[in-house]
């Protein structure tokens, strides 16, 4: 499927009904808490965007997922995922690889949020996903870093003065 920008793929507090693999585009994982929108992750690479665990367990999602740009995705519903697991022996291995990558992402986010400054996390994002830095609204990047947009502007200005922003 090709989805337009700002399409909600997964809603907070609703059952997860589909699993996605992003072929191209940019997606944002976020949570609304006490009326405040918190960006938890931004992805711009080939990546699974929801997990088989939530799909299979019939759990409500604790966060939401939206496209920030036009996205091309592969989509599976629960019946398709179940059929693939029954018919393709290596699908269990793939499911474990998806879960392993998710756990690694969660651990990296936890460590980075505790051990790195916002500037260090911004620089890492800039190196790993330059497309995100160039195209995603600053409010989402600031939210991802857990800082105000004014602080992000100061970080960007400082990196620019040191010649670290291209």
Image (tube, rainbow, N blue to C red):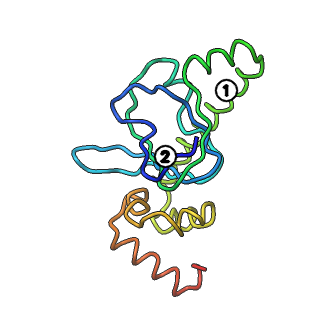
Q: Where does label 1 land, which residue?
A: 96
How crowded pointer 1 is (Cα within 10 Å; few <14, some 14-19, many 20+) is rated as few
Q: Secondary structure at mark 2?
A: helix
Q: Where does label 2 land, which residue?
A: 110
- Of residue 81 and residue 98, the one placed in the foreground of this image is 81
Q: Position of residue 161 (x, y in %)?
A: 51, 87
- Of residue 91 and residue 22, the one placed in the foreground of this image is 22
Residue placed furthest toward the top? 86
User: Residue visible at 55% across and 68% down?
Assistant: 123
Q: Quadrant of residue 102?
A: top right
Q: Position of residue 140 (x, y in %)?
A: 40, 59
Q: Identify whether 95 is placed above or below 133.
A: above
Do the residues under discs 2 and 1 have CB atoms within 8 angstroms? no
User: Residue visible at 39% across and 63% down?
Assistant: 142
Residue placed furthest toward the bottom? 161
How many numbered discs? 2
Judge left or right: residue 166 versus residue 92: left
Q: Give the quarter of the figure containing the N terminus.
A: top right
Q: Quadrant of residue 148?
A: bottom left
Q: Give the quarter of the figure containing the C terminus.
A: bottom right
- Of residue 109 and residue 72, the one placed in the foreground of this image is 72
Q: Identify whether 91 is placed above or below 70.
A: above
Q: Identify whether 145 is placed above or below 51.
A: below
Q: Quadrant of residue 128?
A: bottom right
């Amino acid at each position: 499927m090709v989805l337009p920008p700002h399409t909600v793929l997964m809603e907070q507090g609703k059952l997860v009904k589909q699993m996605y693999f992003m072929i191209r585009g940019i997606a944002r994982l976020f949570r609304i808490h006490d009326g405040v929108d918190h960006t938890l992750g931004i992805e711009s690479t080939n990546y699974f965007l929801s997990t088989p665990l939530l799909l299979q367990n019939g759990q409500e999602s604790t966060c939401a997922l939206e496209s920030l740009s036009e996205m091309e995705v592969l989509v599976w519903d629960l019946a398709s995922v179940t059929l693939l697991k029954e018919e393709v022996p290596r699908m269990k291995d793939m499911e474990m690889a998806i879960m392993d990558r998710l756990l690694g992402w969660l651990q990296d986010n936890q460590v980075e949020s505790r051990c790195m400054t916002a500037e260090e996390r911004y620089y890492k994002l800039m190196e790993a996903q330059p497309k995100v830095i160039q195209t995603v609204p600053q409010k989402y990047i600031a939210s991802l870093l857990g800082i105000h947009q004014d602080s992000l502007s100061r970080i960007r200005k400082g990196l620019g003065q040191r010649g670290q922003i291209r």
